[in-house]
């Protein structure tokens, strides 16, 4: 795979991850269990949206380089004018919110991965990716700490909160393995020095997850068949509904601006 194409795909993958999770978390706005946590999850959504914008802007820049004629690609066209099969986000981030426990676990599993990813991206030979990761790392450090505290609080809380966390694990764990299954563009990115070998992050991710689960008195599933395909555009039925809502205004009123 050519470097330019693998760089574009790699950048879009991380843009899509953060956009879709931001959209999911934003569904909690005005519906959080208490005001403080309503604000917290909404702020996390805004952080993720900012990260998505940084990745999309870079991807648009790469796509426009060397182009002559035709429409200029922007962050908006990449977010609002691509189809479900063109999105490269992992399956985990598109899963339904469920209850508060399920939302918390999804955020924890992803933020723990993202923390390791952004740390590793500091060694990228692409200065733009380094800058995006450096800014995102500060935010992700908080996301990981906040969500891990909630996992412990719910897992080692009441009988009902523990049952809800066990259900969340049952619903979401099967999607966590895809984070460490590299797509072709991720393999190419790692080989060319601007990306990360995501498979190398799995052991440390497991250590961090195990430590939090142990404190939360929650079991780590031993044998799981992991779902995959999101990175190549093969998604669950949930993504289509997310994009229908996300892209509605632009598809109804093309080119509309505030």
Image (spheres, helix red, strand yellow):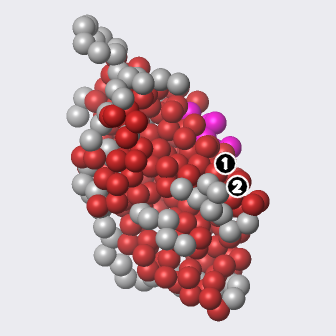
Question: For numbered disc 1, what is the local secondary structure?
Answer: helix
User: Horizontal placement of 193 versus 22: left or right?
Assistant: left
- Marks 1/2 in contact by CB < 8 Å: the verdict is yes
In the image shown, does 59 or 83 lie closer to the viewer? 83
In the image shown, does 201 or 139 lie closer to the viewer? 139
Query: Which of the numbered marks, if any, corresponds to residue 43?
Result: 1
Tell me where residue 225 sits by quadrant: bottom left
Residue drawn at x 71%, y 54% is 39
Residue drawn at x 27%, y 41% is 83
In this picture, is 121 found above or below 173? above
In the image, the segment drawn in magenta is: 132-138
Tell me where residue 38 sits by quadrant: bottom right
Residue position marked by numbered label 2 in the rendering: 40
Placement of the N terminus among the 4 image quadrants: top left
Q: Position of residue 21 (x, y in %)?
A: 49, 52
Q: 10 Å neighbourhood of mark 2: few (<14), some, or many (≥20)?
A: some
């Amino acid at each position: 795979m050519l470097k330019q194409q693998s760089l574009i795909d790699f950048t879009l993958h991380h843009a899509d991850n953060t956009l879709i999770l931001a959209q999911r978390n934003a569904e909690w706005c005005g519906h959080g269990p208490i005001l403080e946590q309503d604000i917290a999850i909404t702020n996390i959504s805004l952080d993720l949206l900012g990260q998505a914008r940084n990745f999309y802007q870079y991807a648009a820049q790469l796509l426009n380089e060397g182009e002559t004629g035709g429409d200029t690609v922007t962050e908006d066209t990449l977010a609002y004018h691509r189809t479900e099969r063109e999105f490269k986000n992992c399956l985990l981030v598109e899963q339904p919110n469920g209850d508060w426990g399920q939302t918390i676990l999804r955020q924890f599993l992803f933020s723990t991965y993202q923390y390791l990813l952004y740390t590793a991206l500091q060694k990228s030979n692409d200065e733009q990716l380094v800058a995006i990761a450096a800014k995102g790392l500060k935010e992700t450090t908080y996301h990981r700490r906040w969500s891990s505290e909630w996992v412990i609080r719910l897992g080692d809380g009441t009988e009902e909160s523990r049952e809800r966390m066990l259900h969340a694990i049952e619903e979401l764990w099967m999607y966590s393995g895809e984070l460490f299954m590299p797509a072709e563009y991720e393999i190419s990115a790692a080989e060319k020095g601007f990306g990360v070998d995501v498979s190398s992050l799995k052991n440390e991710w497991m250590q961090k997850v195990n430590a939090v689960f142990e404190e939360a008195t929650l079991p780590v599933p031993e044998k799981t068949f992991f779902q995959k395909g999101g990175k190549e555009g093969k998604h669950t039925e949930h993504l289509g509904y997310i994009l229908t809502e996300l892209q509605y205004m632009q598809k109804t009123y093309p080119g509309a601006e505030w």
